[in-house]
Image (spheres, helix red, strand yellow):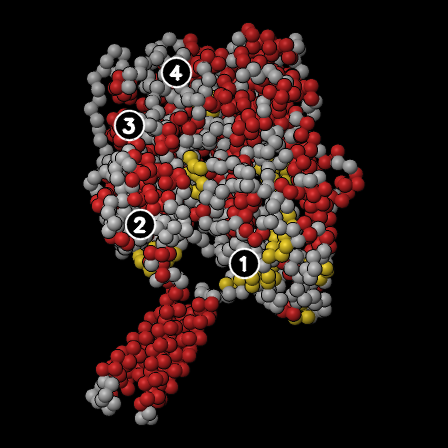
Amino acid sequence: MLLQANETFWLWQLFGRLHPLFVHFPIGLLCVVLLLEILDWRGKSGRLRDGIRILVWVGAGSSVLAVIFGWLLAGEGEYSGDSLEIHRWAGIATMVLSIITAFSLRTNLFGIYRSLLFLTVFGVSFAGHYGAMLTHGDDYISSVLPSSQKYLAATTEVDFVANNSGPMSEQQIQDLNVQVRTILAHNCYSCHGEGKSKGDLRLDSRDGIMKGGENGFVVVKGHPEQSELIRRVSLPKSDKEAMPTKGKRLTEQEIKVLQYWIEKGAVWPEGKEKSIYRVAALEPRMPQVPVPTGDLVKPVDLFVNAYFVKNKIGWKPVVDDRIYIRRVYLDIIGLPPPPEKVEAFVADTRPDKRETLAKELLNRNDDYAQHWMSFWNDALRNDYSGTGYITGGRFDITKWLYRSLQVNKPYNWFVKELISPNKESEGFIKGIKWRGTINSSQRTEMQAAQNVSQVLLGLNLKCASCHDSFISDWKLEDSYAFANIFADTLLEINRCDKPTGKIAGTRILFPELGEISVNESTEKRLRQLADFLVQPKDGRLYRTVTNRIWAQLMGRGIVEPVDMMDNMPWSEDLLDWLASDFAANGYDIKKLIYTIVTSKTYQLPSTSVKEAGDIMANEYKFTGMVRRRLTAEQFTDAISFAFNPMYADTAIVTDLLPKDIKKKLPFPRAGFVKNDPFLTSLGRPNRETVSTSRTSQANLLQALELTNGNKFTETLKTGSKQWREKYPTSELLVTELYRKSLGRTPLPKEIAVAKKMLGPVPSEEGIQDLMWAIALIPEFQLIY
Amino acid sequence: MNTNWNRREFLQRASAATMAALAAGAPVSGLLSGCKRFSGPDSTADTVILLWMAGGMAHTETFDPKRYTPFEKDMEGNRVLSTFKSMPTILDGIHFSDGLQSIGKVMDKGTLIRSYVAADMGHILHSRHQYHWHTCYEPPQTVAAPHIGSWIAKELGPKNPVIPAFVDIGQRFTVGEAEELKAFHTAGFLGNEFGPFFIPDPSQGLDSVRPPVGMDAKRFERRNQLYNELVNNSPIGEFGSDYQRESLKRSMEQAYALLNSPESKAFDLSSEPKESYQIYNTGKFGLGCLLARRLTEQGARFISVTTEYEPFKGWDTHENGYTRLIEMKKQIDGPIAQLVKDLDQKGLLDRTMIVLASEFSRDMMVEGKPDAKVLEQVNQPDILSDLKFYGMHRHFTDAGSMLLFGGGIKKGFVYGKTADERPCKTIENPIKIDQVHQTIYHALGITGDTHYEVEKRPFYTTPDGKGLPVMDLLA
């Protein structure tokens, strides 16, 4: 399917590309001739004559060259369409005209010569216009006219518009104002903004909207029904006073938002516009640790205590040993604890046994790497199969990632190697390249900009890679300037996939981190970028990763969503302290995990919410770890561990992994096989895009896969044979199954239920069904 | 909630509405907010069946035939516009390529579009155009774009709660370009509960919706009972209710209900009367049509039946186009015509829209578009020294045929036109993918500006919410 293009001889290509340069000679020269001719209208043989003659000849000559070069350029096939054909033939016609004009100048038929000259200049302009359209796009000129402004419509609902009648919080006031500005930006700014202020009205600033227009006020605070703004946008389209006059009408919801905003006093925060988005501080901050109180001594607990006191939340007793050991096992190495370890742990009387256990698990370098691999694979969009590989448009970083986790590479080095990569780690910033032409906001350099900023800095550059963002202060130019750091040649800025002819600089998103040397090679620029980003003063980098690790262990970040680090943390002090402590400890992720899992906070009983969305709500109050569903890999590994391996050795992607991987794996772990329908149904993402959280919500397709899917059924079937041979009586079997899968002995009533089903001597079918039932109960599927 | 109900009780107690709500699930996450509108009184369709001609179906060889030039050794390829004769259809003056006479006879029940224009995405990769057709977005995207079936599943939910809202029949993911195929057979950011329910082989459809192989109904019920008892006795019940636990239990109840429901018999093609089965039995695609019909009778929402994409197979004719198409037409002609007739006879065609489409068309000479030719990929000589070069082997994106039946679509109508000489490109009423999607959404009552906010950005069913339904297609 892959065939080569017929490459054009390089010299013709070079000449072709000189066309845009050369066309300016005939354009410039012939226009000047006309100008001089007009200046010298009377003096047909005056002092300018000689100059004019030379100019006409040089103009005509250069037009011949321009045409030849243009023809070569068109042959390259990059351009096509009606515009090209018009440009081509207009150009040739103009060339012929200019030659005739030059010759006509030799006769003394001035009337004819001058008419020809007019025609030639017209031809030059006409052909030039089409040439410009080819280079800059059809609407290069018309697109800046207000009538053709097409914003990305972003109608967003404001829930509290419908159900909030009380006073609004600071956050809500801000949100509402952003909503309002978004609506105005999409629908009104094109005529009432910076470019134009029709009716002397501007709606793009606080002063403008309050001042009103030539017909007076448009907003009457507290009274939407008296506000001209609302009246105009609510009029039927046919009414000649209806607004907007062009483009889409406002939706009912949008009008409702505007009404509500006016009703609530039309608040538009003062000061710089920037102030309406919360922007997290870039610098690190080491807050004062509160003084120890009672049995609380660890900084994490002391900060949480301060938060609890403020929010009138009481401390609950910590969870028992069985729950704790299952949690840390699953959180650190991704496997359930073996029954003998559970019993030994419960029997252990040392006061620091939990700390010891955490240390022990963190020291199991391979098990740790094998579990955290999946988390980083998601975040770094690394997979063993997927789009792009087929045409060599994608590179995996598996080996590098495994080794980095195995040796617990300090996070600053980890980041450095991702951004300023070696062959093994370059996959992250190289992105995914599909065959063919792609949207300019998805070129690989832009993917790098988006992914680096999302994953490492917790900010969203996706909006701003197509147009100035409506949800943050990031501008199109910022994105391009950032992307240029990754680009071998500077990128032309495209707005909504239309070239603008502009080139952004080369700039890091936070200029205070340092200045990128524009003229250096890409390699050097990336090294600079890496150095700048990992500086201690880039608190944002470390807050982002700290928050991600916290979210993995606690079921919810201190900031959510974890990719929006400008959002308000539920405890700024806690986040800032953790990030600073992380930096002070040499960017050691394992140490960070240790700090968290040995805190009393982590050991609080798990909590949950009624609806999945509540976890993300602004009003969320932290009271303890949020219960989580096992990830696809944890669940599969737990099945493999407890009952029977789900995957064969041959399923492991050995080629992509370090050579000795088979020796390091306790069994073929699900994080090291290619994605398949079973894992997909359990929530393993396809890693076509960066993915930084997995849902805890179960669904029908998943349940079907578990209920009658072949893979699962066969695994349990094979497993039941082995278990039957090992455990001849039902009582023994049930006890062992419970110990192995849930880390506890069954309760009498559980034994009774199981025995009722199995009978005194278990059959293979009975064992298979019992394993199935155990695997599906929430106790098995959740980290609680 | 007492979870010990048997299936019958469960279905009796849970009204259709509750079940639909259950199946639709709570929002995937708090990040996802947006506007949601249900199929309103204005909708003209409840169900969509997509008949996917995977690999690029040449319009000039199927529903838009041009001058026929029989094969002669060493003929000039440029002379050949169609390798089949044109045959009349039931519509005056409208001809189909030879081999599609059965479909020709039911064209009084639907609309023929001759002017589908695929996107210009440079060097051809089938799966990229297929991604574009199914999601309306060109890959790659910064956000995982949902399949049209997932949008419909999300907006309307299942029609019958025990039939998954989005069923995908006939595609295996073990073929070349499988990863690219997977990239759009997904609910994307909507969450995998709205993803496709795969039935790669329609004759094995029942296996997906019955108890595991080798497990009889009695054992299946006992197993489920055991599960329920263990859930109720598990000490973590002490922790009170939460959404993870609830959604786990709820999804298990649903799965059990589905696997035990009388509707699941619809997946069993062996219970189809023999005579009817034979008409459909032209291979996997034909049986897929039969399964689609049976599911539609039981209340399916969105079904995709594909001729299956595999590089260089099926419609992806890089050589032997003529002989291959004889086979392809045999596969599709009878079953598609029968599907239309059956649904019509059962009174279901009024609210079921059948859409036949392909990612682009093919031509013997032009790769890409006439004015935007792209990198050559097919070894097609100008002089046809062998029959294997006789056929439409290059990828052509400037025209394409589609068929639409039912669900509010005009009857006996033809839309768009292509040139009668090479390049046989669209010359009237070009229609693009966002218009196709919006027309389908419109018929289903899903408004054009339907969108969700993901990562704070609005993500619409069609890019930027643009693209209007083609009202001319609707009765």
State the residue position of label 1.
B430
- Are discs 2 and 4 both within one chain? yes
- Could you give the CA–CA distance between mark 1 and mark 3, rounded to whole angstroms? 53 Å
Q: Earlier in the sequence, mark 2 or mark 3?
A: 3
State the residue position of label 4.
A605
Q: Is residue A769 left or right of residue A508?
A: right
Q: Is residue A77 visible?
A: no
Residue at x-position 49% and y-position 35%: B191
Q: Is residue A308 visible?
A: yes
- Could you give the CA–CA distance between mark 4 and mark 1, rounded to whole angstroms? 62 Å
- Give the numbered dot on residue A189: 2
How crowded pointer 1 is (Cα within 10 Å; few <14, some 14-19, many 20+) is rated as many
Residue at x-position 31% and y-position 44%: A229
- Could you give the CA–CA distance between mark 2 and mark 4, rounded to whole angstroms? 52 Å
State the residue position of label 3.
A167
The amino acid on which the numbered mark 2 sits, given as a three-letter code, is Tyr
Please give the chain letter of the residue carrying mark 3: A
Q: Is residue A605 left or right of residue B98?
A: left
- Could you give the CA–CA distance between mark 1 and mark 2, rounded to whole angstroms? 33 Å
- Residue that extends furthest to the bottom in the rendered view of this protein: A108
Labels 4, 3: front one: 3
Is mark 4 in CB contact (under 8 Å) with mark 3? no
Task: Tell me if residue B57 comes above or below residue B190 in the rendering.
Answer: below
The amino acid on which the numbered mark 1 sits, given as a three-letter code, is Pro
Is mark 1 in CB contact (under 8 Å) with mark 2? no
Residue A379 image position (x, y, % from top left): 41, 37
Please give the chain letter of the residue carrying mark 2: A
Please give the chain letter of the residue carrying mark 4: A
> Which quadrant holds the N terminus of chain B?
top right
The amino acid on which the numbered mark 3 sits, given as a three-letter code, is Pro
